[in-house]
Amino acid sequence: MAMDDRYLRTGIFLAPFHALGENPTLAMERDMDLLVHLDRLNYHEAWVGEHHSGGFEIISCPEMFIAAAAERTRHIRLGTGVVSLPYHNPFTLASRMQQLDHMTRGRAMFGVGPGALVHDAAKIGIDAAAQRPRMNEALDVIMELMQGRSVTKKTDWFELNAAQVQLPSYTQPMMEMAVACARSPVGAVASGRHGIGMLSIGGTSDDALKAHANNWNIYTQNAEQNGKVADRKKWRIVTFAHVADTREQARKDVEFGLQKYCQYFTDVATFPIIPPGITDPLEYLTTEGIACIGTPDDCIRHFERLWKGSDGGFGAVLLLAHNWADWGATQRSYELMARFVHPHFQRNSNALRQLSYDIATSHSDGYKAQSAAAVMGEIEKHKAKTA
């Protein structure tokens, strides 16, 4: 039996999404409970988003949420997924993240992006066309600051004068960083130029996977041009999945919240996931390969498709935490994936167990005969001594 040499890390991308009828205090507490649940189930990482408007995505400060989560968990790594760089002064942001690096003893990760919701940018007077250039300006500075260097720089939106963070990184040489990359190549260019991670969001249809693979090629080109290594382990792809014991049960589970989620993307979010005119979102999402709603075996096939579509592999698969199902079914889904899907992609972690089982089975008759003979021999010895 050939052992699969892949090791695909697993995690979630927690925007989060909560329907308007939900109690927001309890919703955030449930997000925290989810991270504790995933920590116990050996998920590797969770990325927590930053949003300020729209009503559904209610965490506005991922660093604060991560600090609290770090106190409740033991192993899982926790990343900002992502901080919107145009909304922050890069010096104070870098300083906060250095503090978080120490507070989490190196479990924190620093994910950045231009800002996903135009609503957020508009509320603080930032034009949509300025978001990506500002992200690049801030990222260039942050990369220097996170490595303890002094920066003097003036732009039309921030000014730094011999700015230098006062804490060294707990994680050496610096904390892990990543850039969100959706439809435009901006994230791929930025992450490749600095040799940091790439977070591919924007769906996993066939066309989306081609776009993700093309962005990785852009990443590779920019990494090579800047003397960096294009390591596929730094590439993460975000997808949808909900699993249950049967396909019928999984489909029934997502009736709880799928429609409200799709409506939010139609009404508010920048990129609708359901095109106009689609009357059955569940069928569309599964048929187009955007989501897996089925059994653990279906999820294995879904992840295999992502791997193949990446044209060479990637480092981690992140589930977009969607709250399509109620809390009980959601917990069950993550547990089923951890038990029956993840081992398939982590160097086939049951391969040696299966090999050991097969060897024992192939010699079973002989071993049983030897055992029976040994027992009978002891019985005869005992009889002889007591005669």
Image (cartoon, helix red, strand yellow):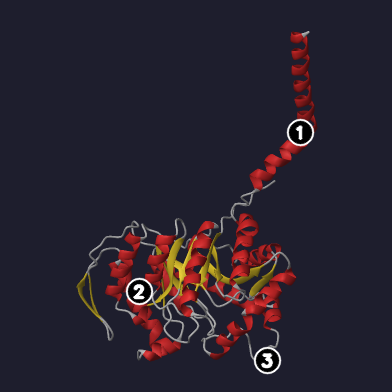
For residue 277, the mark is 3
Decide: is 309 above or below 368: below
Mark-to-mark CA distance, 3 and 2: 40 Å
182 versus 270 height, above or below:
above
Residue type (three-letter) at the residue carrying disc 1: His
Which numbered disc flags the more N-terminal residue, 3 or 2? Answer: 2
What residue appears at the point 64 percent right and 74 percent down from the top-left corner? 291
Q: Which residue is mark 1?
A: 363
Amino acid type at mark 3: Gly
- Percent coordinates x, y for residue 91 in the rendering: 27, 73
Residue at 70% in and 65% down? 295
State how far apart marks 1 and 3 are (Cα). Answer: 61 Å
Q: Residues within 10 Å of mark 3 (few under 14, many from 20)?
A: few
What residue does disc 2 label?
139
Residue depicted at 62% across the width and 54% down the height: 343
Separation of marks 2 and 1 at Cα, in angstroms: 61 Å
Q: Residues within 10 Å of mark 2 (few under 14, many from 20)?
A: many
Residue sitting nearer the eye, 50 or 127: 50
Q: Are marks 2 and 1 in contact (CB under 8 Å)?
A: no
Labels 2 and 1: the sequence-earlier one: 2
Q: Is residue 293 rendered to the left or right of residue 367?
A: left
